[in-house]
Image (cartoon, coloured by chain):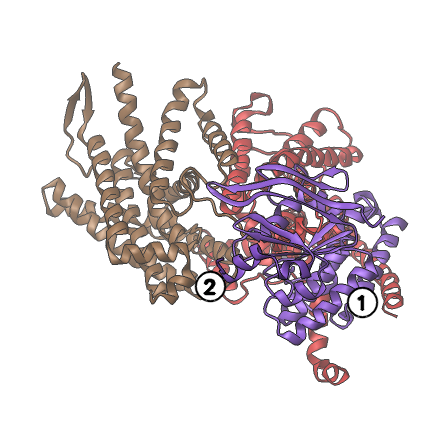
Amino acid sequence: MNTFVQQIINFLQLGSIYALCALSFTMVYGVARLVNFAHGSIFGVSMYVLFFASTYLFNVIESTWLVYVISLVISCIVTSLIALLLERVAYTPLRNAPKVAVVVSSVGAGMVIEYLILNIAGSKALRMPSLIPNIKFDLLGVSVPLYKFMIIIIAIITMVVLNIVIKKTKLGIAMRAVSQDRVAAGFMGIQTSKVVSASFVFGAIIAAVAASLYGTAYSIFAYDVGESIIWWSFIAAVLGGIGSINGAVLGGYIIGAISVLAPIILPVSSYKDIVAFAVLIIVLLVKPTGLLGKKGIEKI
Amino acid sequence: MTQKKNKTNGKGTIFWQVAGVSVFALILVLVKELGLVSTSVLLILQYVGIYSILALGINIVNGYLGVFSLAHAGFMAIGAYVSATLSKYVFMNDWMFIISIFLGGIAALLVGILVAIPSFKTKGDYLAIITLGFSLIIQSVLQNANFVGASQGLNNIPKFTNIYWVFGCLGVAVILVDRFIHSKYGRSLKAIREDQTASMLVSVDVRRIKTIAFALSAFLIGVSGALISHLLGYTSPSAYGFTNIVDGLVMVYLGGMGSIIGSIFGSTAWQLIVQLLKNLGTWRWVVGGGLLVVVMIFLPKGVFGYMELKDIGHKVKGFFNGSKHREDQ
Amino acid sequence: MDTEKIISLKNVCMYFGGIKAIDDVTFDIDKGRLFGIIGPNGAGKTTIFNVITGMYIPTSGEIYYRDQQLNRLMPHTITGNGIARTFQNIRLFEDQTVLDNLKIANFSHTKYGLLDVFLQSRKFKQEEERIEETSMEILKFLKLERLANKRAGSLPYGEQRRVEIARALSCNPEVLLLDEPAAGMNPAEIRDLNQLILNIRDHYDLTIMVVEHQMRLVMEICEEILVLNFGKKLAIGQPEQLKTNPVVLEAYLGKTS
């Protein structure tokens, strides 16, 4: 029973992080239809900004919560600016180019950012200061640290807020329109380039939140922290269905579930990737447009 | 009239092919035997050759067929491991290397046929993820397979690879791909890339063509894996992960999709960039990445996108003869 | 001979969810006929082509090409067996040359294998020559030979339509399905097209099915016409008979009696 509760919490924690990452990835992916391989580096940037900001702030401010909030805001701003710069430099000039050109360009931009981090901050692994007070809770006889709850709660709040923004606000509606048909959205008077920029900012902000949770959960990180995150986000987003926000969340939690379950069921923990991919391949073979993706009927 | 012209053209090209190959062979002999270049340059040349074969293989599926596949790391690993195991335990003489190379390629080819199956129904990024999954599954399996050294990989692989093997294989690969592309198979690849439904409705057997494309692609990639493992003398699962996948894509898209010369150019350019910037230390990746962005902005189809040297020749000629042609019409 | 059936549909239905695109349609086409299908938008005309060419698997019913049932065959097999088509909104391989568009359509009856390609065997060269010749012949017949090396996508609309017909002919068909060949054409162009369709039929000894909005084209050249409305067969017969058929008039003119 104890381990069961523990595993459930582990699953929710990991799933929430994956879900947020997938969500941040899917913002740009869904709206601009761009596989942004530089997104992992954006994630890395927010980790480092958060690290430096919070390390500094702990010298000045005592309240952990306040440090967390302020450094998160700083990280959101810096990350958004870099994402916007990235869009201007590596994406906007290629708006009418073949899709793969944008993919390669984003790979290049990602390399630039990642190795800039390496050259500026060094290759040494860093330890994120704990951003959430170290308190333990008792849940069904299991002692659970507060940060695990907070990760789950913050992730869920972010998802709910994002859902409201996408569903109810003018910007959200414009985003969905651009996502469905960019040309038609342009004809309807939507400034598509601004909407795409907005999606980069959204993606960056969610990435910054996800990074703060990741840092809280795993604390140790290095310059290449975003690398595997980006692939798993891509996988989760596709598994859920390209452009589907709920799909990205679902995909994230499924990847989380597999990561937690596989080591329990399987003899060797490193088989986890194999299981995750096997599930993915089977799902896509049965449903070629992802779990919540819409199937387009081709008109002949 | 047109036909006669074609025939003479055909004979002409064969002459030039033979001439080109002999000159090239001569250069290779001079370079290797007379020690005209340093061993490190010789090594770079071998990398260039091997990665050109890899890029050619990737280009068949990603360029000519237009499918965004990320399966190449998996195929390369299979080619490397199968050939390395064979030449360690079975074909231990260096002239038998050809058998190991071939069987490494064949092993990758057989798996390639399986990987083609998802491409029948799935497409776009969904297929990209499936093929990525394939590559990472192969990597995971190798990491866990004790009989091939698990995460340590294989060591003491006989270093059979030399510049002759590399450029011999590259020559054969170029000829095979060139002939394949200029046949009904190659035409069908391009047709499927443009409009799969219309291809079916002009009698193209889309599934068969996709299977053949994946098989040939996997074969070439497998061969490149075989060559690289016998060049280094060791191979391990970590060599066939994300970095390898991205490297392969960069070479193909930098050089240009759907182009033989583009594949060779792309891998040469990328190897040179990586080697020349070595002095910059870790800054070289910043510069290299920046270069990629710049090239894509100015040449979004890659340097030779959907073009061969002769097309560029035609273009240049056309530019100078432009006015004359218009008068003819 | 003249009553040999080449295409037969027996109680064919095609449903998409709740929408009945084709509802219990039965008809036969004699060999060598010029057969028209007319009906208002959404009547299921193109869907008939799609079930015949294997793009859709009919919900129920049977489709025969001579004695061969087509229901479960793949589109490329059906096309290879002798049923070729054009598309309502042109679908050429735009980045390929006109000649290559035709060559691609030779796929199923090009008799060489991979080994022939890699070894550049005599068979490969002969077949490639043959394909080039027949493709040029077809282009000549449609007066398109001067466009052979032009990029298909660069041609004006009218010529693209003709190239599409040429490409369909390259499949070596016995039955040719034309999906709204006159769309966007003016009366003079339609007159030329009528003549072209008749010429093609006679020269290549084909059976031709035409889906069309343009009554003028259908009424002038078709020998037998199927009238569809909301997926149902309304009438079938010669143009003269249909002109006076009250059911057809009602569907088309909304006449109530």
Q: Which chain is purple?
A: C
The picture places residue A50, in percent across and down from the top left corner, at: 24, 47
Report crowding for label 2: few under 14, some 14 to 19, many 20 or more residues within 10 A (C-alpha): many
The residue tagged 1 is C141
Q: Tell me what residue is drawn at x 64 percent, y 39 percent.
A: B225
B288 left or right of A62?
right
Can the viewer see residue C148 in this picture?
no
A160 left or right of B311?
left
The residue tagged 2 is A94
Asked if badges 1 and 2 are on one and the same chain, I answer no
Report crowding for label 1: few under 14, some 14 to 19, many 20 or more residues within 10 A (C-alpha): some
- Tag 1, which secondary structure? helix
Q: Tell me what residue is drawn at x 23 percent, y 35 percent.
A: A151
Most extreme residue toward the left, as rendered?
A62
Q: Amino acid at mark 2?
A: Leu
The picture places residue C214, in percent across and down from the top left corner, at: 61, 65
The colour with which the image depicts chain A is: brown
Q: Amino acid at mark 1?
A: Phe
Q: Tell me what residue is drawn at x 50 percent, y 29 percent.
A: A278
The answer for which chain carries disc 2 is A
The colour with which the image depicts chain B is: red
Front-lying residue, A224 or B123: B123
